Image: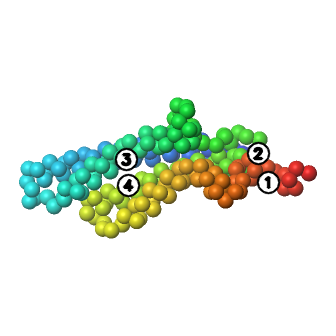
Amino acid sequence: MTADLGKLLTNLATAFPYATKLVTVLIAIAGLLIVARGIGDAYERSISPGRRETPPLGILGKLLLGGAMVSMPFLLWKAGNTFVLGGTGETTIFSYRPPSSDGSTYCQGINAVGVLFFFLMGVCAIFKGCMVLYQMASGFRRHVTGEAATFLIAGTVCFFIVDAGNLVGNTLGLKLGVENVCQLLDNPRGGS
């Protein structure tokens, strides 16, 4: 039965990065479509100002949001390189993850799956926040800036969950690292 759990963790640890990459590509494609819609709205407004009711700020919002969505993978990569690695190395966005689930304990495998799950939830929340902003720019929804900000901030925290945990642990003076938790789970008596 333990071999089945290990195989399940390995499969999940390999599936979550692909799902995260898929959502990231969908964000970039949606960004391109939003930019195209903004350019189309600007063109329609310029040739017949009274026919379309898109305000100039809505058009500008679509263009800025679409551009941000297209460049989001690069921005996450840069943020990961700067904050996580200290800006010292060149890395891809998905090399920022915990040790693989091939570790000696199931705790490390569960940690790898958990962190990769938070990566996926983070990009999904960022996508949802961007779509709420698009609906605001299009005039479909009003006064939901707090909802969009909540999704964007929560998505960023989820994507950088390891750093958020380290930040909270260092602030409170606690050792929240996975190594400590795994050591405690593997040896509950603390080394004796």
Q: Amino acid at mark 3?
A: Met
Q: Are marks 4 and 1 in contact (CB under 8 Å)?
A: no
Question: Which label is found at residue 130?
Answer: 4
Q: Are marks 3 and 4 in contact (CB under 8 Å)?
A: yes
Mark 2 or mark 4, which is nearer to you? 4
Q: Amino acid at mark 1?
A: Leu
Query: Which residue is labeled 1 in the image?
Result: 185
Could you say whether the residue bearing mark 3 is in a helix, strand or loop? helix
Q: Position of residue 28 (x, y in %)?
A: 38, 44
Instruction: In this rendered view, identify the residue nearer to me: 18 or 111.
Output: 111
Could you say whether the residue bearing mark 4 is in a helix, strand or loop? helix
Observer able to see residue 21: no
Question: Which label is found at residue 151?
Answer: none
- In whole angstroms, how far apart are the C-alphas of marks 2 and 3? 38 Å
Q: Earlier in the sequence, mark 2 or mark 3?
A: 3
Question: Which label is found at residue 69?
Answer: 3
- Mark 1, Cα crowd under 10 Å, few <14 / some 14-19 / many 20+, is few
Q: Amino acid at mark 4?
A: Cys
Instruction: In this rendered view, identify the residue nearer to me: 140 or 157.
Output: 157
Query: Which residue is labeled 2 in the image?
Result: 105
